[in-house]
Amino acid sequence: MTLVRFLSVLFVILALFGVTPSHAQTGPQTGPQRTERIEAELVPMGQWAVPGSTAIIAIRQKIQPGWHTYWRNPGDSGGPTEADWTLPQGFVAGEIVWPLPERQRLQTLMNYGYSDVVYLPVPVEVPVSAKAGESVTLSAKVLFMVCSDEMCVPDELTLAVNMPVGEGTPPMNAAHGAAIQKVLETAPRPAEITAHAALQDGMLKLSATGGPLGGLAPEWAYFFPFEGGMIDHAALQQGQRGEGGISLNIVAGRGLKAKGLAQGIAGVLATDLGAWEITASEGAALAGTSGQGVLGSGEGEQTSHASGAAGFVKAALFALLGGLILNLMPCVFPILAMKAAALGRSAHDPSEARKDGLGFLAGVLVTFVALAGLLLALRAGGQAIGWGFQLQSPAVTAGLSLLMLAVGLNLSGLFHVGGRLQGVGSGLAQGKGGVVGAFFTGVLAVVVAAPCTAPFMALALGAALVMPWPLALLVFVMLGLGLALPYVLVSFSPRILSRLPKPGAWMETFRNLLAFPMYGAALWLAWVFARQTGEALGLLFVAGLLLAFTLWLCGRYQSGGRRLMLAVAIVAAVITVPATILAMKAPPVLSAATNDDGEALASQPWSSAAVEAALAEGRPVLVNFTADWCVTCKLNERAALSSEGTARAMADTNAVYMVGDWTNRDDAITRELERHGRSGVPLYLLYTPGVAEPRILPQLLTEGLVVKALSEATKQD
C-alpha cells in the first residue's frame, strides 16, 4: 500500500467520525471542482469520441500560487496524482502520460512536480460497440497531494465529463485541445538510446548514447528516476558531453545501494534539447559520452518560477544578514584590527574616510564575486568542493600565514610599505594611494573571512550553489555587502567619525597593538597547515624566519641603512622563496577523526555506512562536519562538544559521535553537505532511529542545546 493510499483509507475512517480534512465529492459532477488549493476538471482533446479509437482525456489542474502537485516519482516527499476511473462498459483508461516535471527544492529536499496549470493526459479506449449520437459520462475519483513549503494536504475530487460519441475525425477541443496536444508532443517517450549504469563509491555512473542523442550538444542534463530512493534527489548531478552522448555522476540513494543494478534503472533523461525515457542496464561507461564539455544541471530552468523567485529573495536576505554577522566571527578580528587603524587615520578627513570606505567595499565585492565564480566554475567542471575551498589547500594556508606575519611585522614598525597607515592592511601598492590600499584590505578580508560560516550564511550559500549563475553571483554580492556594510556606514557618518580621537602619537602605539591579532592569525594558519601536512611545519617556520629577516633588513635600509643592507635583503629573499615553495608543495595528510585535542567525546570517522550501521543498532548518531580552519567549528567543539554534560548525555542515550573532517578536500563530505543544502562547515546532524531525515542543529552550539536535542531524539525513538 502506497503512502497516498494509506492516507486515503485514513481519511475515510476520519470521515466516519465527522472529520473531513479536505473537500471531497461523492458523486460525478461535470465542470471544474475546487478546494482552497486546487481547481481540477476532466477535459477531452477532441470534441467527440470515435467508436473503436482512443480518446484523450486530460486531468487539468489549476494550482494556487505557492502550492504544487507531484510527478509519478514525487522525490523526497509528497505523492503522485492518482485516478480511480468509473467508465461505461467497454471503455478502458490507460496510464497517465506524465509531462516533464519541475524540480522543486525545499531546504534539504528535492521534489518533482507541477505548479500553476498542468494537464495530465490519459488515453481512453473507446469500444467499437459505442453508438454514434449517444453521450457517455466518464468520471474519475482523483487524489491530489497538494503541498506548499510548510504543509501538505491530500485533496480528493470526483471529476466527470460528458463525452459525445460520433463518426469521423473529431475537431480539436477549442478550449483545451491545443494544450493537451502540446503535452503529448513534448512528454518524455521511450527512445532508441543505449544507456549503461554502474555503482562506484556511492555514485551512480550513468552514460547514454545513440538515438536522438547523436549529434546533439546539450547545455545541461538531469536524470529523473521512475522509482523513489534510487538517487539522492537533492544532490547536484554533474555531467559531461561527448561526441555521441552524455554521462552523469549522480549520488546514489539508499534504495539503489540496497537493491543494486541487476535489474537496471529506468527514468527520464532530460536535457535542454529534449527529454526521453531510458532504461540503463548495468555496465561500464559507454564510449563517446564524455570529453567534449561540461554539462550544467539545468536546475534554474527546471525550477518553478514562483518558488525560484521567492527562493532567491530569501537567499539574498539571508546572505546579507550572514555577512553582517560575519563581522562578529573570530576569524574576522584581524581584519577589523586593520580597519580600526584605517578609521583612526581618516576619522577627521570625511572625504578620505568616504574614499576609504568605498575602496574597502569594492575590494570585498570583487573578491567575493571572483571566489564565487571560481567555485561555480570548478563545480560545473565536476569538482566536489564547497565554500572555504581555498583553505583546503596547504599552499594557500602557508601563503596566508606568511602574509599575516608580514602584515604584523609592518604594524610593529619593522618595515614600512609606503607612508600611509591604510597600507598595512594589504601590504600591497600602498604607495599608489589610500584607496588602493583599502581595496586590497577588502581582498584580504574576504580571503581570510570566507571560511567562517555565520548564522544564515549556510542556507544562503547552499541555495546559491544550485541557482543559475547570475542569481548565484548576486547572492554572493549580498554576502559581501553585509560584510562591508558596517565599515562603509561608519565611513559615511560624520557624527561617528567626529567622536574618534584626533590623529596623534597614540596612533603609533595603537598600530603596534594591532600587530598582535595578525600574529595570532599567522599562528592559527600555521597550526592549520600542520594539521594538513604533518611534518612540513618545519619548512613553514624556516620560510617565516627568513621572511622576517628579509623584512628587517628592508626596514633597516628604509631607516637610512647602507645599500649593503638592501643587497643582503635581496639575497635573503631569494633564499626564502625555495623554502616557501617546498612548504607550499607539502602533500596533504588524510583526514581522520581523532581525539588529540582532548575532547571529552570519543569519536569515529563519519561515513554514510557507519551512520546506517549505528541506526540499525537503534542508536542515535550525532555527526559533526568540521574543519581545522573553521574557527566557529573549533569554538563549538570546545564550548559544547567537549563538555562533561554532553559526554554524559551521549552515554545516557547510547548515542554515537562521528566527525566528518573537511580540513582537506573530501568529496564524500562535500556531497553530504550539498544533500543538506550546505556549501561549507560547520554542519551538525542528529540522526534518530526510525526517522528518515536527520535534525539539523544550529551553527552556534551550547551544551544545553546539544543535551536537549539528544534527549528529544531518545523520546522520539
Image (cartoon, rainbow, N blue to C red):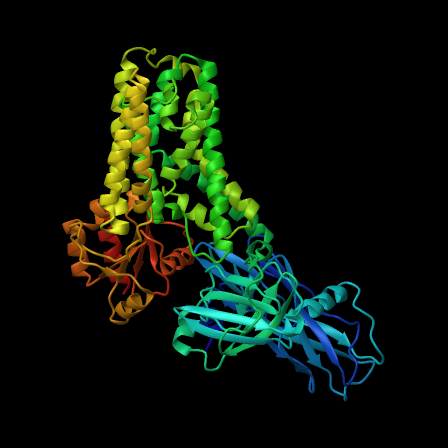
Residue 258 placed where, x, y %? 38, 76
Question: Which residue corresponds to the image point at 27% horizontal and 51% vertical from the top-left?
Answer: 533
Q: Quadrant of residue 667?
A: bottom left
- For the question of whether residue 616 can be seen, the reply is yes
Residue 626 placed where, x, y %? 30, 51
Q: Is residue 361 above or below residue 25?
A: above
- Judging depth in this view, the residue of 85 and 596 nearest the camera is 596
Q: Is residue 589 above or below residue 397?
A: below
Question: Which residue corresponds to the image point at 44% horizontal and 42% vertical from the top-left?
Answer: 318
Residue 619 placed where, x, y %? 24, 66
- Judging depth in this view, the residue of 36 and 435 nearest the camera is 435
Question: Which residue corresponds to the image point at 31% horizontal and 64% vertical from the top-left?
Answer: 607
Q: Is residue 318 left or right of residue 307?
A: left
Q: Is residue 714 left or right of residue 340?
A: left
- For the question of whether residue 11 can be seen, the reply is no
Q: Quadrant of residue 219?
A: bottom right
Q: Quadrant of the C terminus?
A: bottom left
Residue 278 placed where, x, y %? 58, 75
Question: Which residue corresponds to the image point at 45% horizontal and 14% vertical from the top-left?
Answer: 350
User: Which residue ends up furthest to the bottom in the rendered image?
Assistant: 129
Number of marks drawn: 0
